[in-house]
Image: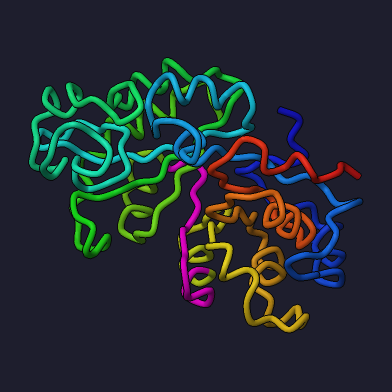
Amino acid sequence: MGSSRDVGGTPRTADTGTRAATTIGVGASAANVDVPSLIAHRGFAGENPENTVSTLRTAATVADWIEIDCRPTADDVCVVFHDPVLDRCTDLSGAVAETPVATVLSAEVDGGGSIPAFEEVLDAVPSNTGLVLDLKGRHAEDPDDECWEWLADPLAAAAGAANPVLVSTFSEDALEAVEEHAPALPTAYLCKRDIDRALDVARRRGCAAIHPSTGLLFGGSDGDPERNPLARAHEAGLAVHAWTVSDTKEAAALAALGVDGLIADYADVLDSVERR
């Protein structure tokens, strides 16, 4: 594993000013930079059947952290599956939130394996590997138009797990649910476009990190730390984990920027990054 950072933690103060002063763009050399934590996106979904128990166990032999997707079935049982519907990558169809858990768990995932219940994943992933829980709601259209009462049991289980756990979501209401049911768990706010809103939500909700898209980190700063999303997040005491990384060139550029973690689809994205 060999990570240089704690995904749920705060960047070292001494690093922050250095990162702001040495921000470089895509294609620059990543030599002599710290190596970010490697976070397996759905268990390295670019090369494995996503979110299955077998995939997550395999990913844990390489990754520092495993990112999984959590959403409710019709009977409010938390399962580990990304899409709101079963159609794309299983042999069944229909909305997960409208399907009983027994049926959801019987689905065969393309490439092999089945959709696991959340507790199965807690039992399967070694305790020295962290878990990033990406909270999904019942619907895809508006993550803030949701009821999150189904989170109580899985969050309690996560809070009692031996693994380090970080909870991430696009929904501020889901962050509020974490505060209610498992206030000790660190949280991260996911963002795709609006860094100002992301930083505002993360500060108000006491998040440990933000999870911005890679495009948000690479665009628009012109080397100015006051406009640079990464520098602004680190100045606010937030760790930064970029998604979704799919090749070594992009990973090297993000490492050179100074991100704290890479949420990656492939296990080898950091192979070209040299440790300081």
> Is residue 94 rendered to the left or right of residue 170?
left
Quarter containing the N terminus: top right
Where is residue 243 drawn, in percent x and y?
54, 54
Q: In the figure, residue 109 lies in which quadrant?
A: top left
Where is residue 176 drawn, in percent x and y?
35, 54
The total of numbered circles placed on residues is 0
Q: In the figure, residue 96 lies in which quadrant?
A: top left
> Is there any visible trace of residue 185 in the rendered image?
no
Q: Image point 14% across, 34% down: which residue?
A: 92
> Is residue 178 rendered to the left or right of residue 224?
left
The answer to which of 62 and 189 lies nearer the viewer is 62
Q: Looking at the image, what colour scheme do you see?
A: rainbow
Magenta span contains residue 194: yes
Residue 222 drawn above or below residue 200: below
Quarter containing the C terminus: top right
> Is there any visible trace of residue 41 in the rendered image?
yes
Magenta span contains residue 75: no
Q: Image point 18% across, 31% down: which residue?
A: 91
Where is residue 68 drawn, in percent x and y?
42, 37
Q: Image point 23% across, 34% down: which residue?
A: 90
Read off the magenta span: 183-198
Residue 118 drawn above or below residue 235: above
Residue 248 drawn above or below residue 1: below
Where is residue 136 drawn, in percent x and y?
30, 48
